[in-house]
C-alpha cells in the first residue's frame, strides 16, 4: 500500500489518535496481515507502542529467513483481520529485542486508514450499566434520553420506553442531539429518523419503541470518535473469552 492508495475519506493523521488505535490493536491481540512489496506474507499482531510513542513493535515469524526478507523489504503493508479494517505501511522495519523476545520495530505511521467492509456494517452496543445514552431535545428545555442498541458509521438504532414520542417522524431531522462516550465525553450531532419499527409491550405493560437514526453532517472529530469506538467494540467482539 502506498500513499497514493490511501483513501483520504478514511485517513487518520492525528498522532495521538493513531497511537490510541495501535494500542487498541495490541490490547485485543487483533490479527494483522503483513505483506512486503516483494510478496512475503505473515500473519502477525501489534505487541505494543513504545513509551515515547515513536515506535510500534510487531510480532515476528518463527522463521529467521522470513524475518530477514521482511527487514530487507523497501515497503511493508499492514491490514487487520477484522470487519473494520485498519491499514498502514512502513518503509523500514528493524529487528529488535522486545519485552518477550525478537520483534519488528517501525516508526508509528504518520497516517493510517480505517475502512469498514460496508458503510453500514452494524455492531451491537453494550447494554445495561455500560449502555450508550443519546440525549435528544424534544421540547423547550426537555431532553429525551434513549438507549443505543447498535451503531454503524452511518447511524444507529435506539430504543426508549413509555409513550411513543411524536418527535420520531420518518425523515425528521433531530438537531442538537449528543452521545456521551466513555473516556471521551459528549459528542454533539444531528440525526435523521430513517426507520420506525413496531413497538413491543413488556409483561408489565410498558411499551418499548425501536427507531433507526442516521447521522447528518458529522464533523471529522465526531466521526473519528465513532469509528474509534466501533474499532474497540469489534476488537472486544472477536477477542476469545
Image: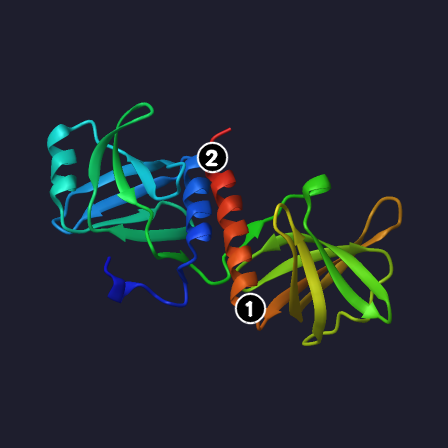
Residue on which disc 2 sits:
239
Quadrant in the picture for residue 32: top left
**Residue 206 vs residue 11, the one in the foreground:** 11
Residue 183 visible in the snapshot: yes
Return the x and y of residue 57 as percentages of the image width and height.
31, 37
Q: Is residue 12 left or right of residue 156?
A: left
Return the x and y of residue 145 as percentages of the image width and height.
78, 57
Residue drawn at 11 percent across, 39 percent down: 69
Residue neighbourhood size for the residue with mark 1, other residues' Cα within 10 Å, grouped as few (<14), some (14–19), many (≥20): few
**Residue 167 vs residue 9, the one in the foreground:** 9
Mark 1 or mark 2, which has the lower sequence index?
Answer: 1
Residue drawn at 48 percent across, 48 percent down: 231
Q: Is residue 61 left or right of residue 82?
A: left
Residue on which disc 1 sits:
219
Secondary structure found at label 2 = loop
Q: Is residue 216 left or right of residue 25?
A: right
Return the x and y of residue 15 as percentages of the image width and height.
41, 53
Q: Is residue 222 left or right of residue 99?
A: right
Q: Taking 9 as reference, is 100 above or below it?
A: above
Q: Taking 241 as reference, is 57 above or below it?
A: below
Residue drawn at 71 percent across, 76 percent down: 172
Amino acid at each position: 500500500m502506498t500513499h497514493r492508495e490511501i483513501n483520504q475519506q478514511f485517513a487518520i493523521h492525528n498522532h495521538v489518535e493513531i497511537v490510541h488505535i495501535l494500542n487498541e490493536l495490541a490490547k485485543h491481540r487483533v490479527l494483522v496481515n503483513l505483506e512486503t512489496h516483494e510478496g512475503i506474507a505473515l500473519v502477525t499482531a501489534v505487541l505494543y507502542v513504545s513509551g515515547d510513542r515513536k515506535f510500534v513493535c510487531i510480532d515476528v515469524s518463527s522463521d529467521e529467513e522470513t524475518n530477514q526478507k521482511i527487514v530487507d523489504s523497501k515497503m511493508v503493508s499492514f491490514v487487520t483481520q477484522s470487519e473494520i479494517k485498519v491499514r498502514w505501511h512502513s518503509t523500514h522495519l528493524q529487528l529488535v529485542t522486545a519485552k518477550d523476545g525478537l520483534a519488528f520495530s517501525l516508526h508509528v505511521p504518520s497516517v493510517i486508514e480505517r475502512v469498514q467492509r460496508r458503510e453500514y456494517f452494524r455492531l451491537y452496543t453494550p447494554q445495561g450499566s455500560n449502555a450508550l445514552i443519546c440525549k435528544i431535545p424534544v421540547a423547550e428545555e426537555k431532553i429525551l434520553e434513549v438507549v443505543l442498541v447498535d451503531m454503524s458509521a452511518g447511524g444507529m438504532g435506539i430504543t426508549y420506553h413509555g409513550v411513543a414520542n411524536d418527535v420520531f417522524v420518518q425523515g425528521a431531522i433531530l438537531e442538537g442531539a449528543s452521545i456521551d462516550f466513555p473516556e471521551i465525553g459528549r459528542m454533539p450531532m444531528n440525526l435523521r429518523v430513517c426507520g420506525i419499527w413496531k413497538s413491543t409491550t413488556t409483561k408489565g405493560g410498558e411499551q418499548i419503541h425501536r427507531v433507526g437514526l442516521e447521522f447528518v453532517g458529522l464533523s471529522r472529530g465526531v466521526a473519528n470518535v465513532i469509528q474509534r469506538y466501533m474499532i474497540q467494540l469489534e476488537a472486544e467482539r472477536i477477542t476469545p473469552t
